[in-house]
Image (cartoon, grey):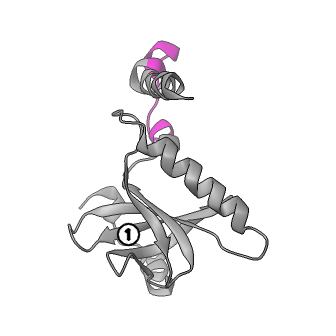
């Protein structure tokens, strides 16, 4: 059993409380509670067609935010669609779900985020940190900036 799959009282409670949502005619089904921030919430979800775990980013809807949401959604989809790099998350699908009245972006699921990766390791010095983490981040930034218009 992987560390992220361990059952604890907290994960059992979270799974019980979490409302399951489905998007794109039930192709993507959420699991657990989202991580929220800014204009969107990100859910761990299952792609019903492939059985794979994906990240489902759902843009918030609400009074007065429609233009902001539309533009944020459009820019994110465009930016991610143009970037193919091993250190940049790939976009798999996107659209508007009329049943949920929300825009969504489906991305590959990355099990360990950068923060937890840094917190889970000790580095002897900056050179070790650079080799383990910094170089990959900088390579992705250089690639993204070289593709910007």
Total count of labels:
1
Left or right of 70? Residue 137 is left
Nearest the viewer among 56 and 136 is 56
Please give the name of the residue rendered at 51% of the width and 27% of the height, measured from the top-left corner: 141
Q: Is residue 125 magenta?
A: yes
Q: How would you rate the neighbour count of disc 1 (Cα within 10 Å): few for under 14, some for 14-19, many for 20 or more?
A: many
Q: Quick one: which residue is furthest to the top in this view?
A: 127
Task: Please tell me whether residue 15 is drawn above or below residue 52 in the rendered image.
Answer: below
Residue at 40%, 25% in the rendered image: 132
Q: Quadrant of the N terminus?
A: bottom left
Identify the magenta region.
116-130
Residue 134 falls left or right of residue 28: right
Quadrant assignment, res 32? bottom left
Query: In this orientation, which residue lies closer to the viewer: 12 or 138?
Result: 138
Q: Is residue 138 above or below residue 13?
A: above
Q: Nearer the viewer, residue 116 or 24?
A: 24
Q: Quadrant of the C terminus?
A: top right
- Is 62 covered by the magenta stretch? no
Question: Between 82 and 39, which is closer to the camera in this rendering?
Answer: 82
Q: Residue furthest left?
A: 50
Point out residue 36 in the picture as x, y percentages from the top left corner: 61, 64
Name the element at disc 1.
strand
Q: x, y (%) of residue 49?
A: 22, 71
Q: Is 108 positioned to the left or the right of 94 in the image?
A: left
**Position of 58 relative to 92 (above/below):** below
Q: Position of residue 129 (x, y in %)?
A: 47, 22
Where's residue 15, x and y in %?
43, 80
The residue positioned 49% from the left and 71% from the top of the image is: 96
Q: Which residue has dot 1 on it? A: 45
Q: Which residue shows up at 20% across the image and 66% down it?
A: 50
Is 28 on the left or on the right of 135, as rendered?
left
Magenta: main secondary structure: helix
């Amino acid at each position: 059993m992987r560390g992220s799959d361990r059952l604890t009282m907290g994960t059992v409670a979270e799974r019980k409380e979490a409302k399951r949502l489905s998007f794109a005619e039930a192709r993507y089904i959420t699991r657990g509670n989202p991580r929220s921030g800014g204009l969107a919430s990100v859910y761990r979800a299952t792609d019903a067609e492939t059985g794979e775990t994906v990240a489902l980013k759902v843009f918030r809807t609400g009074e007065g935010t429609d233009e902001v949401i539309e533009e944020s959604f459009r820019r994110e989809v465009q930016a991610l669609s143009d970037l193919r790099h091993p250190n940049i998350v790939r976009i798999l699908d996107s659209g508007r779900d009329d049943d949920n009245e929300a825009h969504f972006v489906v991305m590959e699921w990355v099990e360990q985020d950068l923060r937890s990766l840094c917190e889970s390791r000790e580095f002897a010095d900056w050179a070790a940190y650079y080799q383990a983490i910094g170089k990959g981040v900088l390579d992705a930034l250089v690639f993204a900036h070289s593709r910007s218009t």
